Amino acid sequence: MHPKNILLLGGSGFVGGHVAEHLVERGLSVRIPTRRRERGKRLILLPTVDMVEANVHDSAVLARLMNGIDTVINLVGTLHSAGGQPYGEDFRLAHAELPQKIVAACRARGVTRLIHMSALGAAPEAPSEYLRSKAAGEAAVLGASNELSVTVFRPSVIFGEEDRFLNLFASLQRLLPVMFLAAPGARLQPVYVMDVARALVESLYRPEAHGRTYDLAGPHVYTLRELVAAVGDWSGHRRPIIGLSDGLGRLQAAILQYSPGKLLTLDNLRSLKVDSVSSAPLPFGIHANALAAVAPDYLAGINPRIRYRALRARAGR
């Protein structure tokens, strides 16, 4: 059975906006809950999107949101939380408890299809609270695979025009004369946001995706130092990079986690100890767009070419 009515949790975020656009292009009705409706101004204009102010962490509200829904896509996530064991409160609520509530609401409302976003490197014994909490949510979803048709995606770092990763390093290199970089040898395999969105939406039409877990990674592996250097080149503000030792990296993170926007936290640093890489190709025959083919345009602010690349990516070219 093809989907018709989608509940998109986390739809007002970076990845969610692109997923919503792909769902609308397929002619699907999309319900997007958000705590602040103004966050989804761009999405409100899409013809089959219904933005609803709601607290998805309230089990009763979550169940009501599933009225008339046949498919749930969960993209809710956070990069930061106060510390705790095995993970902090924000990680617990967003990554561990919410997936459990979603599964329970799906059962109660008879929703049989669930797509869930996890992360590469998620594991119960991972060094970071972020990755441990992601593993808990993943386990809750996969544990329901006997009753629900579930698919889990595990992306590496996701890049795109509005990303908070490459754009952050570009902004820092515009401001600073030197980059002092923690975890310079961390290995990442950035994946394009439109490729991620295409994979999630395509899985709705693929019976072979039921009960499966898919890694999502781009075609090239970079060290963090290589990424920061490339971002400097592409943005026109390359700076000298000084890689920090483990001890100095922890000191930098301990200071920066109290900065506005939390530029780097100790838990972020612990996540970087796990290689965010995969040898698996993107599923469903999707061609992975290379970072170097997309990022230079938006980091340099050449908007018309961004749109052109976006259209090419959406067309699978």
Image (cartoon, helix red, strand yellow):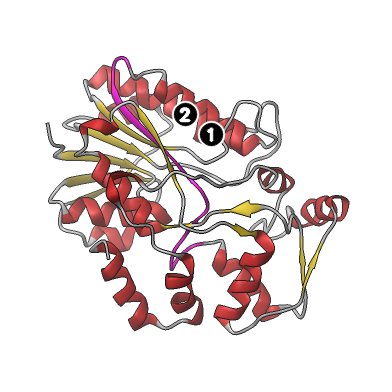
Image location (x, y in percent) of residue 79: 58, 47
The numbered mark at residue 134 is 1
Q: Quadrant of the N terminus?
A: top left
Q: Residue furthest top?
A: 146
Image location (x, y in percent) of residue 89: 61, 32
Determine whether 58 is above or below 252 in the image: above
Residue appearing at x 83%, y 50% in the figure? 246
Residue of label 2: 138
- Secondary structure state at the residue bearing disc 2: helix
Horizontal side of 233 relative to 143 (left or right) equals right
- Secondary structure state at the residue bearing disc 1: helix
Residue appearing at x 31%, y 62% in the figure? 41
Image location (x, y in percent) of residue 151: 34, 32
Q: Are marks 1 and 2 in contact (CB under 8 Å)?
A: yes
Determine whether 175 is above or below 188 in the image: below
- How would you rate the neighbour count of disc 2 (Cα within 10 Å): few for under 14, some for 14-19, many for 20 or more? many
Residue appearing at x 30%, y 63% in the figure? 42
Q: Which residues are magenta?
A: 146-163
Q: How many discs mark residues in the rendered view?
A: 2
Horizontal side of 215 relative to 285 (left or right) equals right
Is 124 magenta? The answer is no
